[in-house]
Amino acid sequence: MNIILLGPPGAGKGTQAKKISENCSLPHISTGDILRENISNNTPLGVKAKSYMSRGELVPDELLITIIKERLSRSDCSGGFMLDGYPRTIPQVDALQMILTESGRKMDVVLNIDVDDEELIKRLSGRRMCACGTSYHVDFNPPEKEGFCDSCKGKLYQREDDRAEAIRNRLIVYKKQTQPLINYYTKKALLRRIDGSKDISAIFEGIKKVLENYD
Ligand code: AMP
């Protein structure tokens, strides 16, 4: 099954993507994670992406298209994949379509997680991350010991783009560049809406219900 997870920043895409990936045995492809890893390793790609990301802007399409083309060509994607954070613009949609057509594949479903702006700002500004990939929220999902990860005991940090100014920018960018994708995939009859205002396990139950109709 080939899945896209759409939704504004803070909708919980990363959290749900991990759960879907385990449940359906699909590789979880997060372009945000790929970019952050490149930044940590100081690669040429990471150097190019860093300033866009810290301002809450999108990284240029040509870089993302190169990343996704390479990632989708790997053998672990031959039985299906789940995209989290890609596509985010219409040129990225077109590039994805071309990559899939060339390799005789197609999208099966696009899950759109809906959450209102006020809730998104609360979620993003309170989010804390661990280098091991686990995320927390200071109020809604705090770690046992403040500031430290429950699973690896690492020190938690706030993503640079989870600070107030960058959050505002990310929401503006989302509305302008990514929201049009909802219309696009609705017209293609691929879009399924998920109520993202609930808690993590209730959202996942909603997703499982939708995915029961595909295999
Ligand atoms: P995420 O972890 O998905 O919230 O992504 C974090 C940041 O990485 C975004 O705010 C963008 O700056 C960048 N990014 C991730 N995916 C993409 C994409 N498909 N197109 C452009 N920029 C992206």
Image (spheres, rainbow, N blue to C red):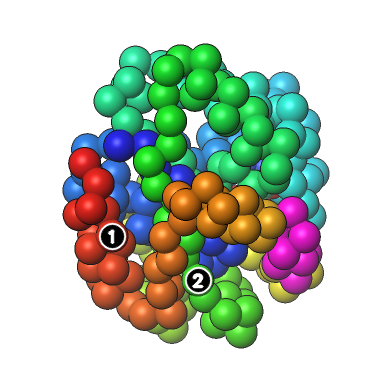
Q: Is residue 61 left or right of residue 36?
A: right
Q: Name the residue under label 1.
A: 210
Q: How many labels does the image show?
A: 2
Q: Is mark 2 within 8 Å of ligand 1?
A: no
Image disc number at residue 114 = 2
Query: Looking at the picture, how far across and down is residue 56, in whole percent?
Result: 74, 56
Q: Quadrant of the C terminus?
A: top left
Q: Is residue 193 positioned above or below 41 on the image?
A: below
Q: Which amino acid, by three-letter code, is at mark 1?
A: Val
Please check the rendered image and state whether residue 52 is part of the magenta-colored stretch, yes or no: no
Q: In which quarter of the image is the N terminus?
A: top left
Q: Residue at the spot x=42%, y=18% of the render? A: 104
- Pointers 2 and 1 in contact (CB under 8 A)? no
Q: Residue at the spot x=77%, y=66% of the render? A: 172
Task: Of the two numbered discs 2 and 1 on the same chain, state the one appearing first in sequence.
Answer: 2
Q: In which quarter of the image is residue 75?
A: top left
Query: Is there any visible trace of residue 110 in the rendered image?
Result: yes
Q: Residues within 10 Å of mark 2 (few under 14, many from 20)?
A: some
Image disc number at residue 86 = none
Region of the chain picked out in magenta, as a range: 168-177
Name the residue nearer the viewer: 45 or 5. Answer: 5
Name the residue nearer the viewer: 44 or 83. Answer: 83
Please check the rendered image and state whether residue 173 is part of the magenta-colored stretch, yes or no: yes
Query: Looking at the picture, how far across and down is residue 157, in whole percent?
Result: 54, 60
Nearer mark to the viewer, of 2 and 1: 1
Q: Is residue 124 positioned above or below 39 on the image?
A: below
